[in-house]
Amino acid sequence: MNPTSPKPTASDPVSKSTRARTVAVGASLAVGTILLFSRTFGYGFVNYDDPTYVTANPHVQGGLTWAGLRWAFFGHSDYWHPLTWMAHMLDWQLYGPAAWGHHLSSVLWHVLNAVLVFLVFRRLAGGLWRSAFAAALFAWHPLRVESVAWIAERKDVMSGAFFLFTVLAYARYADARTAGRAAWGRYLTVLGLFAAGLMCKPMLVTVPLVLLVLDYWPLGRGGSLVALRGLVLEKLPLFVLSAADAVVTLVMQKHEGAFVLHVPLSARIGNAVVSIARYLEKFVWPADLIVCYEHPGAWPWATLGLAAAGLIGVAVLAWRLRRSRSCILAGVTWFLVMLVPVLGLVQVGFQAMADRYTYLPMLGIELALIWGLPEITGPARRRVAAVGAAVLLGACAARTWAQEAVWRDSVTLFSHAVRVSPDNDIAEGFLASAYYSTGNFDEAAAHAERARSLNPRNDRVLVLLAGLSERKGDAPRAIRLYCEALALRPGDAQVQCQLGLLEYGAGRVEEAREEMTVALRADPALAARTLEIARGAIQKGDGDGALFLFRVVLAVQPENSEANGWLGALLLAQGDAAGAIGPLRLAAAGAPHSTEVQLALARCAARLGREAEAAAALAKAEADAGDHAEVLAGVAAEQAQLRNYSAAARIFRRVVALEPENANAHASLGYFLLVTGDRAGGLAEWRRALQLDPNLPGLRERLDQAER
């Protein structure tokens, strides 16, 4: 370590008073951070990524189950972050759809990180009050709002915690190695914590390089080329984890078709340079913070030149001060190294930059600035410094409190983005979607049209406009828009399925069949939605439309029990028993314990004169009904249709035993007892039925007539 650099003091004996101050600072950070972010507890979910991570994710909503854990580790998503998925599962298990609980969890993770930053800086760089100021600046800076208030960004705060734990563990390991002791246990702890961090967010892939930076300063382990080589070799297991995680992430994003903005490499490099400068600007002056900074393509040469000149100046200054202020070079390098994965050199997504990407990199800038300042001596100067620090933190907290209000709901979030960035088609599109979900279709249409005018190739906006056209009954325009969207996003099964539905409604049956067949083959899960639409068509009296949809599903999934069951039931209702028997048999084979299917099969077989098959289906239905009285009553009614009155009476005895207060069951049992010759028993059941319900239609007259 350079002797002129600020020295770590954590290894020195710590007095009781210092420990008390440390505890007090940690508690103050925790309480202040909770209070500052408490207004998010009253906010809801937003329509940007929250559906993917929570509100429309059946795996997450299943809670922490073995099936859920298997999906978290081996399922498909844009990122491999199983610990993040598990955290969302736990939240849903604890809070369900109540957004306040999910916000609470995010805030608590951020509170933990605030305390950890204090401990990390205290351990690495020393200085109780510098560390406290740095931790408060980290926790209360407006750039933190996106990571904390956005539920889908749980991965930010979780990966932050594991990163900070990793740094603390590495400092312990480095102390042991510097003292010449073996430290395999400590190294394995570092490795485990780093692996956990990667399982929260892959942005941590450059952490091994950050640890090398810390070896330079403040740990002072890299004094020679030989030592540096040893430090690199020491981190090979960490680099292997990083490489594996990077490969998995890229493969998953390609497999899942993550949105990729096609930008030339030169433009990506230019945007990376400008983004670094903009991050520094927003750290110093956090104004006009929005959730979606649209990628400009290529920046003007003047902007690019100014940004590059500024960054070169910072780099030159850090290098020139490397001996007198090693912390500046270390901090700037930390900042740059942690930003590399999200600078868009491999462009995924539409954004040029994002506030959330600063969560950990900005700690490097804090390290450079706060520890790069000379020691303040004298009580008067220290008082001035304390007042200045308090004013700065107060200003940050006030700005953060105001920025949190932007995240109240989707409309508020993207209305703010549109005000700050009026020509942002991404923000306009999300705002249109937010209005659509609230039922404000006029505003949705206005903002969607605005987004389309800004970027005619925004496929998501085209899909939204198509949906709005459907609502207005303008099917031809909806079809055109869906076709445009498919041209930009070929293979989108949901869009293709919706296009097929519209084409069927327009009378283009063969085109519809082709579109929907392709869609269902691409995404078999769409079968459930198609069947739901088909059932809706039945309720509206559109039997032909329902038949078309059932047959489309069965063309792709011929053994789909639900589709076969519904098709058979519909054909039977239309009088086509011969056509219904095949699908019903397939449905019964695929869902052998479905009493509804067995009853339909029995009715169909009876109409075709296949009494043995009908009797077998009824016997199976009765066996599977168990103690379900309503189902048993249905089985008895079908037995009566086959003139098996004794069987009907026997089954209704079971129904009456299960529901002794069911007047209708007593009345039915009485009828079948009379038919089978048990006059006394039948009349007794009718009398009991009338005791339970004196107003049963026609039963008293029939009883009086039978008793004469």
Image: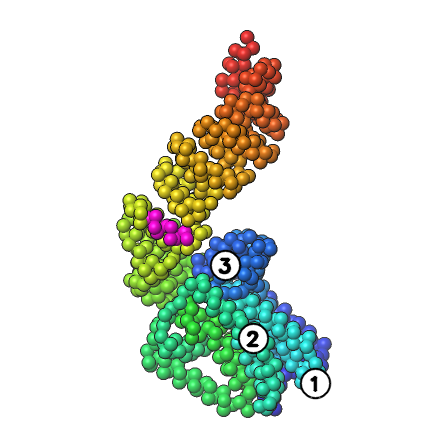
- The structure's colour scheme is rainbow
Camera-nearest residue between 551 and 25: 551
Disc 2: which residue = 240
**Numbered disc 3: secondary structure:** helix
Which quadrant of the rendered structure holds the C terminus?
Answer: top right
Q: Where is residue 113 in the image (x, y as percent from the top left)?
A: 58, 70
Check whether the beta carbons of the residues at disc 1 and disc 2 lie within 8 A of each other.
no
Q: Is residue 472 visible in this depiction of the protein?
A: no
**517 part of magenta stretch:** yes
The kind of residue on which mark 3 rests is Tyr
Q: Nearer the viewer, mark 1 or mark 3?
A: 1
- Residue, x 71% and y 79% (percent of image)? 15
The kind of residue on which mark 1 rests is Gly
Distance from Cα at disc 1 to Cα at disc 3: 46 Å
- Residue, x 57% and y 90% (percent of image)? 225
Magenta region: 512-521
Precedes in sequence: disc 3 or disc 2: 3
**Is residue 146 positioned above or below 649 on the image?**
below
- Residue, x 46% and y 37% (percent of image)? 584
Q: Give the numbered dot on residue 53.
A: 3
**Numbered disc 1: secondary structure:** loop
Is 434 situated left or right of 236 in this image?
A: left
